[in-house]
Amino acid sequence: MPKIVFLPHEELCPDGAVVEAEIGETILDVALRNGIVIEHACEKSCACTTCHVVVREGFDELEPSDELEDDMLDKAWGLEPESRLSCQAKVVDCDMIVDIPKYTINMVSEGN
Protein backbone atom coordinates (compact mmCIF):
# COMPACT_ATOMS: atom_id res chain seq x y z
CA MET A 1 0.00 0.00 0.00
CA PRO A 2 1.52 3.36 -0.99
CA LYS A 3 2.30 5.98 1.60
CA ILE A 4 1.96 9.74 1.32
CA VAL A 5 4.15 11.98 3.42
CA PHE A 6 2.48 15.35 3.94
CA LEU A 7 5.16 17.86 4.82
CA PRO A 8 4.49 20.12 7.80
CA HIS A 9 2.02 22.93 7.17
CA GLU A 10 1.63 25.59 9.84
CA GLU A 11 -2.17 25.34 10.01
CA LEU A 12 -3.26 22.05 8.43
CA CYS A 13 -0.72 19.58 9.86
CA PRO A 14 1.98 21.33 11.90
CA ASP A 15 3.95 18.13 12.49
CA GLY A 16 3.46 16.70 9.02
CA ALA A 17 1.96 13.25 8.54
CA VAL A 18 2.71 9.87 7.01
CA VAL A 19 -0.45 8.11 5.87
CA GLU A 20 -1.44 5.07 3.86
CA ALA A 21 -3.29 5.54 0.60
CA GLU A 22 -5.37 3.36 -1.67
CA ILE A 23 -4.39 3.18 -5.32
CA GLY A 24 -6.89 5.20 -7.36
CA GLU A 25 -8.04 7.60 -4.65
CA THR A 26 -7.12 11.25 -4.94
CA ILE A 27 -4.49 12.95 -2.84
CA LEU A 28 -7.27 15.20 -1.51
CA ASP A 29 -9.39 12.25 -0.39
CA VAL A 30 -6.38 10.70 1.37
CA ALA A 31 -5.70 13.98 3.17
CA LEU A 32 -9.33 14.49 4.21
CA ARG A 33 -9.64 10.89 5.45
CA ASN A 34 -6.64 11.52 7.68
CA GLY A 35 -7.82 14.81 9.16
CA ILE A 36 -5.76 17.09 6.90
CA VAL A 37 -8.44 19.50 5.74
CA ILE A 38 -7.10 20.88 2.47
CA GLU A 39 -9.49 23.52 1.21
CA HIS A 40 -11.56 22.43 -1.80
CA ALA A 41 -13.99 25.22 -2.62
CA CYS A 42 -15.37 23.63 -5.79
CA GLU A 43 -16.14 20.33 -4.03
CA LYS A 44 -13.54 18.39 -6.07
CA SER A 45 -14.86 19.36 -9.52
CA CYS A 46 -11.62 20.86 -10.92
CA ALA A 47 -13.14 24.33 -11.02
CA CYS A 48 -10.78 26.20 -8.67
CA THR A 49 -7.23 26.01 -7.31
CA THR A 50 -7.84 25.82 -3.56
CA CYS A 51 -6.60 22.22 -3.31
CA HIS A 52 -3.30 22.95 -5.08
CA VAL A 53 -0.36 20.88 -3.80
CA VAL A 54 3.22 20.29 -4.89
CA VAL A 55 4.22 16.64 -5.28
CA ARG A 56 7.88 16.72 -4.20
CA GLU A 57 8.44 12.98 -4.79
CA GLY A 58 6.38 10.64 -6.94
CA PHE A 59 5.22 13.34 -9.38
CA ASP A 60 6.59 11.55 -12.45
CA GLU A 61 4.67 8.39 -11.55
CA LEU A 62 1.27 10.14 -11.57
CA GLU A 63 -1.00 10.12 -14.58
CA PRO A 64 -0.47 13.36 -16.50
CA SER A 65 -2.80 16.25 -15.78
CA ASP A 66 -5.43 17.01 -18.38
CA GLU A 67 -6.02 20.33 -20.14
CA LEU A 68 -8.70 21.47 -17.68
CA GLU A 69 -6.45 20.86 -14.68
CA ASP A 70 -3.55 22.61 -16.42
CA ASP A 71 -5.77 25.63 -17.12
CA MET A 72 -6.80 25.80 -13.47
CA LEU A 73 -3.22 25.35 -12.23
CA ASP A 74 -2.14 28.38 -14.26
CA LYS A 75 -4.16 30.43 -11.74
CA ALA A 76 -2.72 28.81 -8.59
CA TRP A 77 -0.63 30.72 -6.07
CA GLY A 78 2.96 29.44 -5.91
CA LEU A 79 2.76 27.28 -9.04
CA GLU A 80 5.74 24.93 -9.49
CA PRO A 81 6.59 22.35 -12.17
CA GLU A 82 5.41 19.57 -9.81
CA SER A 83 2.10 21.29 -8.94
CA ARG A 84 -1.16 19.35 -9.11
CA LEU A 85 -4.72 19.83 -7.97
CA SER A 86 -5.07 17.30 -5.17
CA CYS A 87 -8.69 16.62 -6.20
CA GLN A 88 -7.48 15.37 -9.59
CA ALA A 89 -4.16 13.61 -8.85
CA LYS A 90 -4.84 9.93 -8.20
CA VAL A 91 -2.57 7.74 -6.10
CA VAL A 92 -0.54 5.16 -8.00
CA ASP A 93 1.63 2.34 -6.69
CA CYS A 94 4.43 4.51 -5.35
CA ASP A 95 5.13 6.55 -2.25
CA MET A 96 4.80 10.32 -2.49
CA ILE A 97 5.90 13.41 -0.63
CA VAL A 98 3.34 16.21 -0.82
CA ASP A 99 3.79 19.84 0.13
CA ILE A 100 0.68 21.94 0.79
CA PRO A 101 1.37 25.57 -0.15
CA LYS A 102 1.11 28.16 2.59
CA TYR A 103 -1.47 30.18 0.66
CA THR A 104 -4.38 29.47 -1.62
CA ILE A 105 -6.60 31.64 -3.77
CA ASN A 106 -10.28 31.45 -2.90
CA MET A 107 -12.34 34.26 -4.37
CA VAL A 108 -15.33 33.36 -2.21
CA SER A 109 -13.68 33.14 1.21
CA GLU A 110 -11.50 36.19 0.50
CA GLY A 111 -14.57 38.29 -0.17
CA ASN A 112 -13.65 39.22 -3.76
Image (spheres, rainbow, N blue to C red):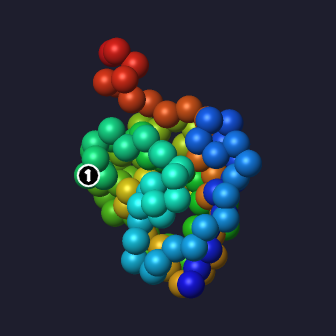
Q: Is residue 84 at least partly visible in the picture?
A: no
Residue that extends furthest to the right in the rendered view of this protein: 15
Side of 80 relative to 91 (left or right):
right
Dot 1, crowdedness within 10 Å: few (<14), some or many (≥20)?
Answer: few
On the question of residue 90 being in view, the answer is yes
Front one among 34 and 70? 34
Q: Which residue is mark 1?
A: 45
- What kind of element bears circle 1? loop
The residue furthest top is 111
Q: Quadrant of residue 12?
A: top right
State the image quarter where residue 57 is shown: bottom right
Quadrant position of the C terminus in the picture: top left
Residue 95 versus residue 1 in the image, above or below: above
Q: Position of residue 78 (x, y in %)?
A: 58, 38
Q: Name the residue at 62% across, 35% down.
A: 11
Callout 1, which amino acid? Ser
Residue appearing at x 49%, y 34% in the figure:
104
* In the image, residue 72 above or below residue 10: below
Front-most of residues 110 and 30: 30
Left or right of 34 on screen, residue 14: right
Looking at the image, is 100 positioned above or below residue 110?
below
Residue 9 position within the rendered picture, expressed as x and y whole percent measured from the top left? 66, 42
What residue sits 32% from the left and 58% below the top? 67
Question: Which residue does the image show at 58% across and 79% down from the upper left?
Answer: 2
Give coordinates of residue 35: x percent, y percent: 52, 52
